[in-house]
C-alpha cells in the first residue's frame, strides 16, 4: 500500500483542507448566515464573496478545568510577597460580571464573534446547494456544435502565410549538411594532401594536378546543393475540432403599472439576480431579455426595466405575446435553452387572464424549459393567480410562488428549484 502526502503550500500558506473541514463542521451556521446575507447585500454584489460571522458560543470547544475546592500546588516565579504556609484569598465569583477589564461593546458585533470570508464559488455553492434546474433530461443539454481552430503540428504543403521560416531553414540546413558532409570531409583531406605535396622539395606535378582537379570537382558538387528546396518547407497546420456549447436565454417579465411600487420592483430584481447566478452554474453563455408591460409590452434594457416609472392598468398577455415573438425571431428551441421568470403584484384585467392561459399553454410552455411566476403582494390573490394555478396543475415546467416580504425571496427561490421537486409534486 502506498501513501501519498501532499505537502504543497496553498495561497498565502493557508490550508485548504482545514478550511473545507471548518466549512463542513459549521455548515449549518454558515448557511444561515448566507441566507441572511442574500437579503441584506446589494444585488450587484451577488457575484462576489461574503463575510460570515459566527457567534463564539457556536464554535467553542470543550475544555477540562479543576473545580472548586481541594488542595492545589502552584509555583509563582519571582515571588516576593508570600512565604510557605501563607493563605491566598479566593478571587470573588458569582457576581455575574466578566473577567475582562473593558466594558461591553456598543457596536453590533463584539470581539467574541468569529468572522471570516468565503469566496464567490464557496458563496454560490452554499447558496444553491441541493438545488437543480428541472427538465434537463428531456432533451440534450448541448444543442449547438461550434468548430474551433486548433494547432495540429506542421505539414509540407500549405498557404504561404502559414510558412514557418525558422523551421524551414532548420530543415534546409540539416539537408545540406547531410548531402555534403562526406564531400566536405574529402575536400579537407584533399586540400591537406595538396599542401603537403607542394611543400616537398620536388613536387610531383601529376599528383598535384589530379588533386587540384578533384578539389575543383568537390567544390562544384558542394555548390550544386541548393540552399533551400521544396522538401525543406514547413507550414503550420491547423484543424477544426467540434466544441459543444450550451446557451441559455433568460426572459424577465415584470408588471410596471401604477400598482407596482419601487420596493416591489427591488424584490423582483433580487429574485432575477438569484436566477441568473443559478443559471451561470449550468450554462456558459447566457443572454437576458427584459420585457416590461402595463397595458402594452416593450423590450428594454436593465436600467429602464427596474427604474422607469409608468402608470395605467395591466394587460399581462401583451408581455406573453412579445416574448413569443422574440423566441420565434431570435431564439430557436433547437439552439437555445429558454427560461422565464415573471414578477407581478397579481393585478390584471379579468378579461385578459384567459388569453394568458391560451398563450402560455399553447405556445410558451412548449418551448421553455422552466417558467417561474412570483406574485409579490400582501393582498388576496387576483384572477391571474387562479388562471396560473390551473396551468401549474397540468404542466411540470411551470411553477408559481407567493412573496410577501424581502425575507421570503431566498426560501421561495429554494422551493422553486429544490431537487426532485417535480417527483415530490407528482407524489
Image (tube, rainbow, N blue to C red):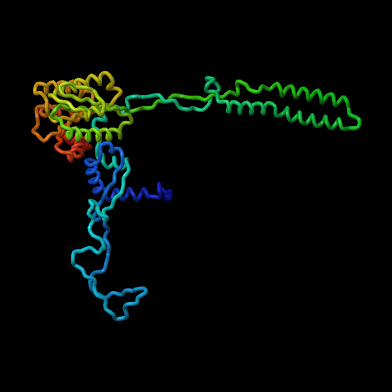
Task: Identify the residue at horizontal 15%, vertical 36% (top origin).
Answer: 403
The quadrant of the picture occupied by the C terminus is top left
Q: Nearer the viewer, residue 169 or 47?
A: 47
Left or right, 28 with respect to 155, comes to left
Residue 262 visible in this rendered orientation of the protein: yes
Task: Identify the residue at horizontal 27%, vertical 18% (top origin).
Answer: 329
Residue 138 visible in this rendered orientation of the protein: no
**Rendering coords of residue 319 (x, y %):** 19, 23
Kindly indicate the quadrant of the structure image that contains residue 228: top right
Task: Identify the residue at horizontal 27%, vertical 58% (top origin).
Answer: 61
**Rendering coords of residue 401 (x, y %):** 15, 34
Kindly indicate the quadrant of the structure image that contains residue 47: top left
**Rendering coords of residue 162 (x, y %):** 52, 23
Task: In the displayed orientation, state which residue is furthest to the right.
Answer: 202
Figure check: 78 above or below 119:
below
**Rendering coords of residue 194 (x, y %):** 83, 29
Figure check: 336 above or below 130:
above
Query: Total number of numbered labels?
Result: 0
Amino acid at each position: 500500500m502506498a501513501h501519498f502526502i501532499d505537502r504543497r503550500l496553498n495561497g498565502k500558506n493557508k490550508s485548504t483542507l482545514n478550511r473545507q473541514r471548518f466549512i463542513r463542521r459549521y455548515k449549518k451556521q454558515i448557511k444561515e448566515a448566507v441566507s441572511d446575507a442574500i437579503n441584506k447585500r446589494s444585488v450587484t454584489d451577488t457575484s462576489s464573496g461574503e463575510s460570515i460571522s459566527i457567534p463564539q458560543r457556536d464554535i467553542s470547544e470543550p475544555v477540562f478545568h479543576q473545580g472548586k475546592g481541594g488542595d492545589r500546588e502552584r509555583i509563582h516565579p519571582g515571588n516576593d510577597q508570600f512565604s510557605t504556609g501563607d493563605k491566598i484569598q479566593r478571587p470573588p465569583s458569582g457576581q455575574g460580571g466578566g473577567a475582562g477589564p473593558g466594558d461591553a461593546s456598543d457596536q453590533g458585533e463584539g470581539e467574541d464573534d468569529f468572522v471570516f470570508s468565503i469566496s464567490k464559488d464557496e458563496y454560490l455553492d452554499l447558496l444553491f446547494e441541493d438545488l437543480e434546474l428541472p427538465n434537463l433530461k428531456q432533451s440534450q443539454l448541448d444543442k449547438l456544435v461550434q468548430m474551433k481552430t486548433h494547432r495540429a503540428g506542421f505539414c509540407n504543403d500549405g498557404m504561404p502565410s502559414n510558412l514557418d521560416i525558422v523551421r524551414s531553414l532548420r530543415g534546409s540546413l540539416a539537408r545540406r549538411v547531410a548531402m555534403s558532409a562526406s564531400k566536405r570531409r574529402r575536400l579537407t583531406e584533399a586540400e591537406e594532401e595538396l599542401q603537403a605535396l607542394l611543400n616537398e622539395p620536388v613536387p610531383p606535378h601529376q599528383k598535384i594536378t589530379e588533386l587540384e582537379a578533384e578539389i575543383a570537382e568537390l567544390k562544384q558538387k558542394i555548390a550544386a546543393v541548393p540552399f533551400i528546396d521544396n522538401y525543406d518547407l514547413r507550414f503550420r497546420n491547423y484543424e477544426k475540432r467540434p466544441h459543444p456549447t450550451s446557451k441559455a436565454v433568460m426572459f424577465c417579465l415584470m408588471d410596471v403599472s401604477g400598482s407596482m411600487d419601487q420596493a416591489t420592483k427591488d424584490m423582483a430584481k433580487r429574485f432575477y439576480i438569484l436566477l441568473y447566478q443559478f443559471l451561470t452554474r449550468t450554462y456558459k453563455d447566457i443572454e437576458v431579455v427584459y420585457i416590461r408591460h402595463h397595458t402594452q409590452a416593450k423590450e428594454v434594457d436593465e436600467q429602464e426595466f427596474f427604474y422607469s416609472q409608468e402608470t395605467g392598468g395591466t394587460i399581462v398577455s401583451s408581455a406573453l405575446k412579445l416574448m413569443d415573438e422574440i423566441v420565434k425571431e431570435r431564439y430557436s428551441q433547437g439552439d437555445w435553452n429558454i427560461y422565464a421568470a415573471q414578477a407581478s403584484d397579481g393585478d390584471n384585467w379579468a378579461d385578459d387572464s384567459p388569453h394568458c392561459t391560451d398563450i402560455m399553454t399553447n405556445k410558451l410552455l412548449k418551448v421553455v424549459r422552466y417558467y417561474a411566476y412570483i406574485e409579490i403582494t400582501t393582498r388576496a390573490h387576483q384572477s391571474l393567480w387562479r388562471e396560473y394555478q390551473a396551468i401549474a396543475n397540468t404542466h411540470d415546467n411551470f411553477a408559481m410562488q407567493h412573496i410577501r416580504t424581502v425575507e421570503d425571496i431566498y426560501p421561495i427561490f429554494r422551493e422553486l428549484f429544490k431537487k426532485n421537486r417535480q417527483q415530490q409534486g407528482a407524489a
